Amino acid sequence: MNPNKYDPVEGRSVQIDEVDWVEFPGPLSQGGIRWKLLNVAPELGSWAAIYDCPKGSSFASHVHVGPGEYFLTKGHMEVRGGEGEGGVSVKAPAYGYEACEAFHGMTNFLEDSEFYMTFLGPLNFVDEEGNTIALVTWKTVQEAWDAAQQAKEG
């Protein structure tokens, strides 16, 4: 690993259509979700990504240790289980804010969807009893992205 890889930078930009989609890690989602990592900011403990979520796909249960903001650009998403479970159901275009300690028992997609999200702090993926399955930080996200890129290269 390049020790300077995570040094703060003055700024960066990403031409999203020039970045290939990769499969989001299976244990943390189901239904074929793909993602593109756009940025990590070690100095903030944050990262930003865009997600492509087929109809019927979902993310595993998780807690936002830090807040997050999303912009649903396409589709229909149920957050925190949807309205029937005390969450929300949003249709594109839609913006949402997830507070610290927000619990998502289920985030699922009722139609093909795409959204951008900035995470300010870790996500704690949990099982039915609330036990940690994976604590996802900016660094683990970068490592997962790097591993996916290496796997594509051969």
Image: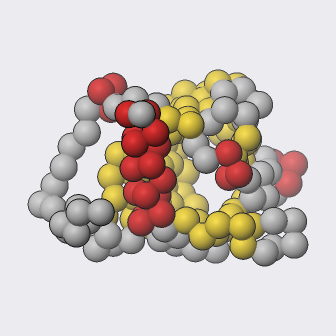
Determine the residue positioned at 22% across, 69% down: 3
* Image location (x, y in percent) of residue 67: 51, 67
Q: How is the image coloured?
A: secondary structure
The answer to whether residue 3 is visible is yes
The quadrant holding residue 99 is bottom right
Query: Is residue 33 positioned above or below 64 on the image?
Result: above
Looking at the image, residue 125 sits to the left or right of residue 2; the answer is: right
Looking at the image, residue 46 sits to the left or right of residue 59; the answer is: left
Determine the residue positioned at 78% across, 47% down: 82
Q: Nearer the viewer, residue 90 or 59?
A: 59
Quarter of the image with the C terminus is top left
Query: Is residue 78 positioned above or below 137 on the image?
Result: above
* Image location (x, y in percent) of residue 41: 31, 64
* Image location (x, y in percent) of residue 140: 48, 63
Determine the residue positioned at 39% across, 71% down: 45
Determine the residue positioned at 87% across, 65% down: 128
The quadrant holding residue 126 is bottom right
Query: Is residue 108 positioned above or below 66 on the image?
Result: above
Query: Is residue 89 positioned above or below 101 on the image?
Result: above
Looking at the image, residue 99 sits to the left or right of residue 153; the answer is: right
